[in-house]
Image: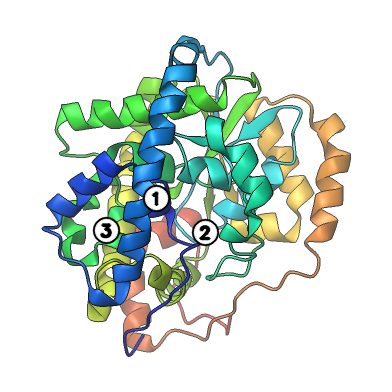
Amino acid sequence: MAKLKHRWSLGHNYMTGVTFGVWLRLLVQNRFRLSPAYWHRVAFITLASLANSGFAAWETLRHGRAITAVQITKPPLFILGHWRSGTTLLHDLLAQDTVQFQFANTYRVVNPLTFLTTERAVTRLLPGLVPDKRPMDNMPLKFTSPQEDEFAPLLMTGLSIYLGVSFPQTGANYAKYLSFRGVPRPEVERWKAAFLRFCKKLSLNDNRALLLKSPPHTARIRTILELFPDARFVHIHRDPYTVFQSQRHFFDTAGWYTYLQSPDLAAIDEGILQRHETMYDAYFEDIALIPAGHFTEVRFDALEADPVAQVAAIYQTLGLGGFTVFRPQLERYVATLAGYKKNSFLTLDPATRHLVAARWQRSFTVWGYPTEPQDER
C-alpha cells in the first residue's frame, strides 16, 4: 500500500442504494470534502439517490402498512465474527438450508428501501451491475448471493462504522457505530427501527427463520437481543495473524472501490488493530447475555477442513432441527468448493507480529492460537 490507487468500477460501491436525504446528510457531515479522483462516484451516487428516493416513496405507499404488520415469529440466527474470519464461508454453508432459512441477498442489502419494487426487473435486465467476484478474495458474487446486512440499516439511517471506509478522513466520527457504546439513545433506536423494518421486509412474504451475517453485530449482542431476545448466535474465529493480514489485503483491494475521500495509508494498520479491540471488548462483555443453548462457536480451520461435520455440530448445539434432510444439499454444495483457492500471505515481519500479538493477546489466548512465528500462509 505504498501509493494511492484508484478504481473506476461503480458496481462494488454499496452507496448506490442510498436515498437523496440520507446522502445529502452524509455530504453535509463531511462538509462536501470529496476527493477529485472519486467525483465520478459522487455523481453516480447522487443520480442514483434521486431515483431511489422516488422508488422508496412508492414502495412505502404500496407496502408500508403490510411491512409494519409483519410479525417475525421464528428466532433469527446471527453469524458473528471479525472481518476476514470466515463469516462468508459459514454464511454460504448455512444458507444452503433453504427449507429452514431465508437470507438477505446482495441486491436487497444495497437497496433496502426499494427491493420490493425494483429487484425483479433490475436483477433480470442488468446483472452486469454486480461484479462476478469479490475483489479481496475472488469469491463468487451475484445479486442473489447471501450478503451481510450491515449495508441495509447504513443506507436507511446513515449510521454505520462502514461509512468510515467511504469517508476515511472523518472515519473517527463513525467508529462509535461499531458497538454503539456511547451513542445517544435516539440514534440507537433509529438504527434498531431501521434494522427491524428491513428484517420485516425480508419476512413480508417469507416466514422462514432469518439467517443474518454482519461482522459489526459481533460488537452489538446487547442491541440485537433488545430486538430479538430469542436469537441464536454462532461465532467464528480464525488465526489472528491471518485476520490481520487479510484485513490489510482488503484495504488494498476492495477498499479502493469504496473510497470517496483519499485515505491515509499510514493509518490503516492502527485502524485494523483498534477495530478488533473495540469489537472484542464489547463481545466479551456481552456474551453472557445470550441465553443458554443459544450460542456456539467454530474455528475457521475446522470449518474449512470438514464443513459438514462442523455445520452438524452447530445444528446440534443450537437445537436446530432438519439437519438429516439438509445434509445431502450441504454435501453437494461443499463439493463445488473443491477448486477454490484462498489467499495466501507471507509471514509477518517481526515488529508487526509482536505488535499484533500484544494488542490482540486475548484472542490468541482465549481461542488457543500460538503467538510464535507462523509458517508461511
Quarter of the image holding residue 2?
bottom left
Give the secondary structure at mark 3: helix
Q: Is residue 31 above or below residue 358?
A: above
Image depth: mark 3 or mark 1 in front: 1
Q: Which residue bears the numbered disc 2? A: 85
Task: Decide if residue 86 is on the left or right side of residue 284.
Answer: right
Amino acid type of the residue tagged 3 in the rendering: Gly
Q: Which residue bears the numbered disc 1? A: 48
Q: Which residue bears the numbered disc 3? A: 164
Q: Is residue 286 visible?
A: yes
Quarter of the image holding residue 228?
top left
Q: Where residue 271 sits: x, y (%)?
A: 27, 66
For the N terminus, the quadrant is bottom left
Observer-nearest residue: 23 or 355? 23
Q: Where residue 151 sits: x, y (%)?
A: 42, 46
Seen at 70% across and 73% down, the residue is 341
Observer-nearest residue: 336 or 225? 336
Amino acid type of the residue tagged 2 in the rendering: Ser
* Distance CA(mark 1)–CA(mark 2): 33 Å
